Amino acid sequence: FPPVQVSPLIKLGRYSALFLGVAYGAKRYSYLKPRAEEERRVAAEEKKKQDELKRIE
């Protein structure tokens, strides 16, 4: 296909959507990261307890 002239309005819309997606992703990541770390910490404690119980048996 030969190169096509894309309307500047469409280009602006596409780059705006890209930027908004990246911004949303960064915000969402910073929101979820501490929760996931806490979840992993709790899971590790739980596993420690389970391993301890298995060792005692």
Image (cartoon, rainbow, N blue to C red):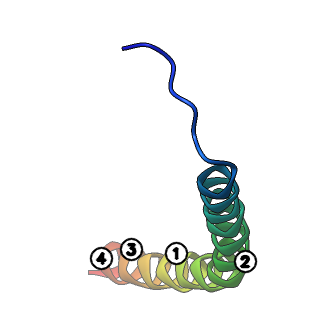
Q: Which residue is mark 4?
A: 54
Disc 1 to disc 2, how far (Cα)?
Answer: 27 Å
The three-letter code of the residue at mark 1 reads Ala
Q: In this figure, which residue is indicated by the disc labeled 3? A: 51
Could you say which quadrant of the image residue 50 lies in? bottom left
| Labels 1, 4: front one | 1
Q: Is 7 located above or below residue 38 in the figure?
A: above
Mark 3 vs 2, N-terminal side: 2
| Dot 2: element | helix
Dot 2 amino acid type = Lys
Q: Residue at x 44, y 13 (%)?
A: 2
**CA separation in Å, label 2 and label 4:** 41 Å
SS state under label 1 = helix
Residue underneath mark 1: 44
Q: Is residue 4 left or right of residue 14?
A: left
Please tell me which of labels 1 and 2 falls first in the chain.
2
Q: Position of residue 8 (x, y in %)?
A: 69, 49
Please report the residue visible at 59 percent of the width from the left and 55 percent of the height from the top: 10
Return the x and y of residue 28 as percentages of the image width and height.
Answer: 64, 78
Up/down of 32 relative to 23, above or below:
below
Q: Give the spatial CA distance, label 4 vs label 3.
A: 5 Å
Find the distance from the CA under tag 3 to the CA under tag 1.
10 Å
